[in-house]
Amino acid sequence: MNRIARIASLGHYLPSRVVTNDDLAALMNTSDEWIRERTGIQERRFVDDDMGCTDLGVEAARQALAKAEWDVTDVDFIVFATLSPDLYFPGNAVLLQDRLGMREVGALDIRTQCTGFVYGLATADAYIRMGLADRVLVVGAEVHSRGLRLTDEGRDTAVIFGDGAGAACVEVADEEGPSRILSHSLHGEGKHAGELCIVKPGSADSPYVSAEQIEAGLMAPHMNGREVFRHAVTRFPEAIMEVLEAAGLGLDDLKVLVPHQANLRITEMVGKRLGLGPERVISNIERRGNTTAASIPIAFSEAVDEGRIERGDLVCLAAFGAGFTWGANLLRY
Ligand code: COA
């Protein structure tokens, strides 16, 4: 018998503090009009001082576990995707394992930034298919707000990113059932690593990090926005077509696309290129900002809660981000 996997449930968590574009304009030389026009973002959430990335992941995971009716002891593997971990090492997956009181299960961190959840779901599916696990918890969470430069120097990236977490319970599935994970496409092209990155602390050269480097902003994200945009609008459609072709399906079969919420203009251009109207493309960036590894599970979870995605619907998840990395998952929810 072939082992297959499915998403049993989703959960998400957003910190309560709403940060509007006007709030940012009070800190740096930007405006609500500029941010809305270039990114579509109206507001995002930032954590308060007492909350960290694992904390967000714990809340999203609790919600997903409750919806799947799993006990924490049912989980036999954890995948945690983030670019803003609590510690440089160890990764957030073990911190989450401890916080939730789980068994001493495998705990893997994924570092593919905006594509983190797509890689994480592919990993969970592969582990389940191989028989390495039956019930995998996949989490994507980010605390960007602490790493951004909320100043004129950092304004090109500071206005884009937000905090949040999403989670999925992924389990071995009944072959006769309506839901299953179908196919994946995963890519990377490291020659573009410098276009979107955080340079320090880093072991590539000396010093590992210095006060001068911190002052120069090397611990904050650096982004060549135009290059990111140019590559994203071709890589998203490529990855989406790859997973559809791998499953022997076409765009007409697709109920909805849940893209990584990079930027509303990217999402709209991808929808247009594929001929998918706004009713078939999930977007929440207006209220959530870009939450990197958390953006797909938050948008997916919200869409399920709102009734836009139902059991058995054909759903494509797709992402592009730093690395560059990009990819997609195709599934029947
Ligand atoms: N507020 C006001 N002005 C800003 C600004 C801000 N927050 N950030 C940059 N600017 C200025 C620039 O300094 C520049 O000024 P200049 O013309 O005087 O030099 C001007 O706006 C245009 O900058 P540019 O970078 O050319 O703008 P753009 O049209 O490329 O838009 C992005 C910038 C970042 C919105 C756009 O490139 C983009 O969306 N890229 C994709 C980024 C993305 O999705 N990242 C997530 C990856 S997963």
Image: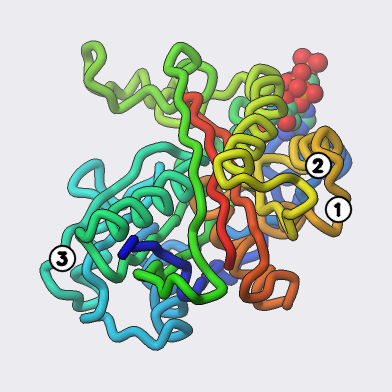
Q: CA distance from mark 2 to mark 3?
A: 40 Å
Q: Amino acid at mark 3?
A: Val
Relative side of 189 to 246, left or right:
left
Where residue 305 sits, quadrant-wise, is bottom right
Quarter of the figure that contains the N terminus: bottom left
Q: Which residue is mark 3?
A: 105
**Is residue 323 among what the camera can see?**
yes
Q: If you read the primary sequence from the N terminus, does the residue marked by circle 1 or circle 3 appear first?
A: 3
Q: Residue at x 75, y 71 (%)?
A: 308
Q: Residue at x 36, y 39 (%)?
A: 111
Q: CA distance from mark 2 to mark 1?
A: 7 Å
Where residue 158 sits, quadrant-wise, is top right
Q: If you read the primary sequence from the N terminus, does the residue marked by circle 2 or circle 1 appear first?
A: 2
Q: Quadrant of ligand 1?
A: top right
Check the image and report above or below for 290 versus 333. Answer: above
Where residue 76 sits, quadrant-wise, is bottom left
Query: Mark 1 and mark 2 in contact (Cβ < 8 Å)?
Result: yes
Residue 253 in picture, x, y percent from top left: 74, 54
Q: Which residue is mark 2?
A: 271
**Is residue 35 among what the camera can see?**
no
Looking at the image, which is closer to me, 165 or 152? 165
Quarter of the figure that contains the C terminus: bottom right
Q: Residue furthest left?
A: 104
Q: Amino acid at mark 1?
A: Pro
Q: Amino acid at mark 2?
A: Gly
Q: Residue at x 46, y 75 (%)?
A: 8
Q: Residue at x 21, y 57 (%)?
A: 107
Q: Which residue is mark 1?
A: 278
- Label 3: state its secondary structure: loop
Residue 96 in picture, x, y percent from top left: 27, 65
- Label 1: state its secondary structure: helix
